[in-house]
Amino acid sequence: MGLQIPQFTWPGAPESIGPKLAEIGRAADGAGFASVWTMDHFFQIGRGYGEAEEPMLEGYTALGFLAAATRNAKLGALVTGVNYRHPGILAKTVTTLDVLSGGRAYLGIGAGWYEREARALGTPFPPTAARFEWLEETLRIVRRMWSENNGPFEGEHFRLEETLNSPQPISRPHPPVMIGGTGEKKTLRLVAEYGDACNLFTFGADPAIARKLEVLRRHCDEVGRDYEEIEKTTLGVAYPGRGGMDAEKVVETCAGLAALGVEHAIFSLPDVEEIEPLERFGEEVIPAVADL
């Protein structure tokens, strides 16, 4: 089970954000969450999470902070838009997180979608087709930088004269690459070719998940990849409203996801800053899910 922290609109912000984020990280680690995730956005995204003007932390700085507050949970951004960072710098950033956390980093990445923040802050935002081309080149560059080959990379969109990356990550053979998105023709094909994990958004044990995983299996067959090598993950919300959490319902949802082939269920908790939801997860949800 994983925890995503998508909001920082907490009482007393911004002064309270640092201490509260550290408290959340320690509590999640103590509760037994296998992973802790931030979003990788510069503006809050709307979509029920809050308005653009609400607090949003830069993802990798926050993850480095969480690395110091945790000991066991893996850490990652769910997920980085490929248009936010040059591929070589992104590989270096995730390597740094992996080294400082003792080998606990994921690289979460996708094609990106949030045009407003890109236009506002001046980052590139080419058409969708071009972003997918960037994504594939970035995956190739990251793979190169996490290898012994320090030679140049010549792509259609990116050119690196050296792919030197020292130190190399602690994770072996490298931090797992999670590709986020549900697109059947492009995204899941890239998962089959380059990914160590996929991430699918869900509101529960949706049968559509099974269909997406079957598409992924077909892509794996086409490229000669072992489908079982890929970690199947989902992202959802543990409970839709404020004021409580039905632990039994969360366990039931996870059982349904497991039956569909999901191995790692990641949730955001709307009242995570109150800490009590994390404690209840540790007491009532995570042990029950471990028995599935």
Image (tube, helix red, strand yellow):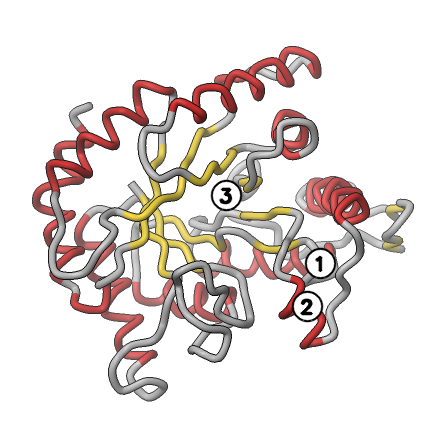
The residue that appears at 36% across and 54% down in the rendered structure is: 4
Q: Label 2 neighbourhood size at 10 Å, few (<14), some (14-19), many (20+)?
A: some
The residue that appears at 30% across and 50% down in the rendered structure is: 72
The numbered dot on residue 118 is: 2
Query: Mark 3 and mark 1: span between their CA atoms?
Result: 25 Å
Q: Does 195 appear above or below 24?
A: above
Q: Residue at label 1?
A: 83
Q: Which is in the foreground here, disc 3 or disc 1?
A: 1
Taking 166 as reference, is 242 left or right? Answer: left
Q: Does 59 appear above or below 177?
A: below
Q: Are marks 1 and 2 in contact (CB under 8 Å)?
A: yes
Q: Quadrant of the N terminus?
A: top left
Q: Residue at label 3?
A: 171
Q: Position of residue 112 (x, y in %)?
A: 64, 53
Q: Position of residue 284 (x, y in %)?
A: 9, 42
Q: Label 3 neighbourhood size at 10 Å, few (<14), some (14-19), many (20+)?
A: some
Tell me the element at label 1: loop
Q: Which kind of residue does numbered mark 2 sit on?
A: Ala
Q: Which is in the foreground here, disc 2 or disc 3?
A: 2
Q: Quadrant of the C terminus?
A: top left
The residue that appears at 45% across and 73% down in the rendered structure is: 51
Q: Which kind of residue does numbered mark 3 sit on?
A: Ser
